[in-house]
Every structure is written in C-alpha cells, then in structure tokens.
Image (cartoon, rainbow, N blue to C red):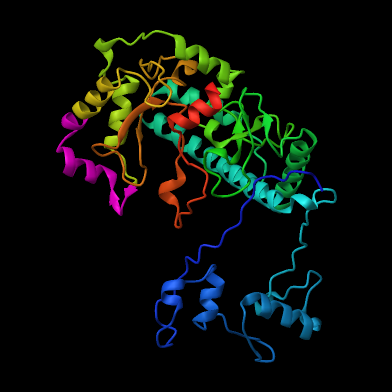
Amino acid sequence: MPKTMPKHTKRKSNNYKCDGSCGKANCRFIKKGFPSKCDLQRHLGRDKHVCPVCSELLTWGSGTLYRHFRGKHQKLLNANDGCPKHNIPNKRSKLKVPDGLKEYKDPFYYLKEKIRICIISDHQRFKDLEKSIEKYQEINNQDKVRYYTNILANYADVVEKTDQNIHQFATQWLRYLVQTKRMDTFQHESGLIFAYHFQKHGGLFGISLDRKHNDYPHFDGSRNAFQNVRDVRLCLNTSCNPLMHYKDFKQSVLEQIKLPSTLDLNILMHRKSICYRSISHIWNSKRKVKNQVEHVLLKNMFGDLKNFKSYCKKVLEDQDYRCAITGIYLLNGMYDTMPDEEKVFAMSINAIDPKVGHVKGNIEWVCRFINVINAEKNKKVHHKDDPPNGWTKELFEKYFLG
C-alpha cells in the first residue's frame, strides 16, 4: 500500500424521498429519504417481479429475477446465459479492476466514468459538426462549410463506446498516473502544484481529460488513443484551452499580470467584440435559475438589453477593466479575428454565486480561463467539506502566486 492515497470521497445524499404512497402512517422516509432509487422502489413495493416460468414472486429488483431464472431454469438459457423469449438478457462478463491497481479501485471506476462521458461527447460533436455543415450549406456560407468540414475529417475514426474500450483506456490512464506519481501532490506541466480529486464533487480540483487540440476528438481509434488528451484539473479544462497555447501556463499568467492595459474603449461595445458577445450571451441565456429561465429573470430585472448592457459596463468600469480574481487587465477584440492565445485572457462575465444567476450585485468580469464550469448550481446536496467549484482571490494567490 502506498503511503498516500488519492483524494476520493464517497457520500450518501439520501435524495430519494418517499412521496407518501407507501401507505405507512408517519413514514420517516418522507423527510429522511433513501440514498438510491432502488431503495425507494423497494420501500414502495415496486421492485417485485414474477418469474415467467414458475410464477415465483421475487423482490429486490430485476437482478434477483435474472439470478433466479439462471439458477432454476438453466435448460431455457442460451450459450450466453440469456433467454430472449422471457426477456432475460445475456450475461455480461464483468470487467474487474486489473491486477496491481486494486488498491485504487474507487479512482479506477471514477476514471472509467470520465472516459465514458468523453467518448459520448466525441460522438455528439460528430453529429453537431454534420448539422453545422448542413446549416451553412443552406445559406451558402462556403467559408463556414469548409471550416467545419475540415474539423469533421478529424472525427473519421472516433473510438466506439464499448465496455472493453472504456476499461482498457481507464487501465492505461491509471497506470500512467501511478507510474508518474500523479496520485498525490505533484508539479503539473502547467507549472502548478496540486493534487487531483477523484470524485464527482471534486470541484476545481477534480481530475479531467483535456483535449490538446480542440479540433480533434478525445479518442481516435486510428492513432494512439491518448495522443490528443492530457490529465488536468477541471479548473484548467476550459473552452479557451489555456494549456494548448501556453506550455508553462503559471509563468504566462505571472507575466500577464505585469502587462499594462491595451484596451480600446472605442470598440468596447462593438457588436462583434468579445465584450458585447459576453453580455449578449448572458442576456439570451436559456439556463434555469431557481426554476426560471435566466433571460426572463434578467428581462424582469433590467427591462431590456440596453439597461443590462449599461449595468455590465458600469461593473467593468468599477473594476478598472481588470479581472476581479487575478487583477490582470482584461483583453477585448473582435471575436472572429482575435488570436486564440489572447482569448485566454479576454473578458468574460461571471456569476459570483452561480445559484443566483447574473443579476445585480452578483456579476463580475474575469479572464476567460478563470470562468470555469461551476457545478455548485447543479448539486442536489451540498456538503460544507466539498472542494470549491469556482476561483477566488485566495485560491488564485495560493496556486499562482504562492
């Protein structure tokens, strides 16, 4: 056993509550709830199954029925221990944690889930690219057609989402992390010193797979599967892809802090500028904030886009056009022509408390690399010891200036 183990915390949320249909007077599970949907179904008596052959009543979910059928009615099974006639699925061989990695069982299964999501994302991107090509062909925008066609060519051999592929990639990834001593605190190639969190609620510090080049999928079957991915903390895995443009990102940030402002106020609110696009994007947001579409929330508060734009501009002025977290002078330019490496430090609107939305008193301007996906608003259960989901001045000083 190693002296240190990766940060992986399991917790039970008891999020599945009884709706009172169990028929039990003063049911304590109406408030307490269950940690899983299966437990709730069992409590409500909805997990009972009848064997289609011998009519024996079985509880504890469909898995119990399958085990009963395979044990009592073996003559009806096919070579894969299934019976299509009675809806008994073929038995899948369970892929276990490889030898030598069993002490990292929880991180291994967490990595498998991350890989599964990445492969699904690759296949969805393939479909989205096809739709974009069709869209721009209809309006005869050949520049966009060529652009998306060239990207689509990179997705010609996307890895299929199979249990074997996911298991194989997770094994390779975990062995690499163990061999390179990245399962505890270490110095990342970005220049930052940190430790990964192998947990769903890992926040800024959760481990993730970052694409080295955004125009390629995470996994390509015709090449080395890990040719286009690197492990990073979630806080560095953003749409502006900072590690793609800056090898020693920590040093690049420190150099950017020293630079004077180059902001041209004459184009600040140009319709194609990053500043204007940021405001417009938030104004038209369809995400839900407290069960209300954010656009409707903002319209009720500000009236129209002009007032919202004026408020955002005032916040930017009050910040002296600096990032509220890093103090870096924010960059602006035309989105279509601004170099991608400069977009890393371009201005972006952030909701200080993501659960509240981009409302008055809850808006700040930050560098794009600071504006990471904040999962706080998606949590069903909040724990006081959960890692942070968004950057703060204190965290920035600790990891970049410390």
Front in this rendered view, residue 81 or 390: 390
Q: Is residue 184 left or right of residue 148?
A: right
Left or right side of 70 for 16: left
Determine whether 12 is above or below 3 in the image.
below
Picture coordinates of residue 366 (x, y %)?
38, 26
Q: Which residues are magenta?
A: 288-308
Q: Is residue 315 visible?
A: yes
Specify whether residue 85 is in view: no
Q: Where 378 falls versus 19 (above or below)?
A: above
State the residue at coordinates (81%, 83%). 75
Quarter-of-image position of residue 226 = top right
Question: Magenta residues: mostly which secondary structure?
Answer: helix
Q: Is residue 349 magenta?
A: no
Q: Who's the residue at 32% across and 44% down the image?
A: 286
Residue 12 screen position, x and y as percent = 55, 62
Can residue 299 be found in the magenta stretch? Answer: yes
Q: Position of residue 313 (x, y in %)?
A: 24, 24
Residue 206 in percent (x, y) is at 58, 41
Farthest residue, direction right: 99
For residue 241, side relative to residue 276 (left or right): right
Of residues 18 and 158, which is closer to you in this image?
18
Q: In which quadrant of the rendered view does residue 248 lie?
A: top right
Whether 291 is drawn above or below 261: the answer is below
Residue nearest the viewer, comparing 193 with 43 = 193
In this view, the residue in front, 21 or 65, is 21
Quarter of the picture holding the C terminus: top right
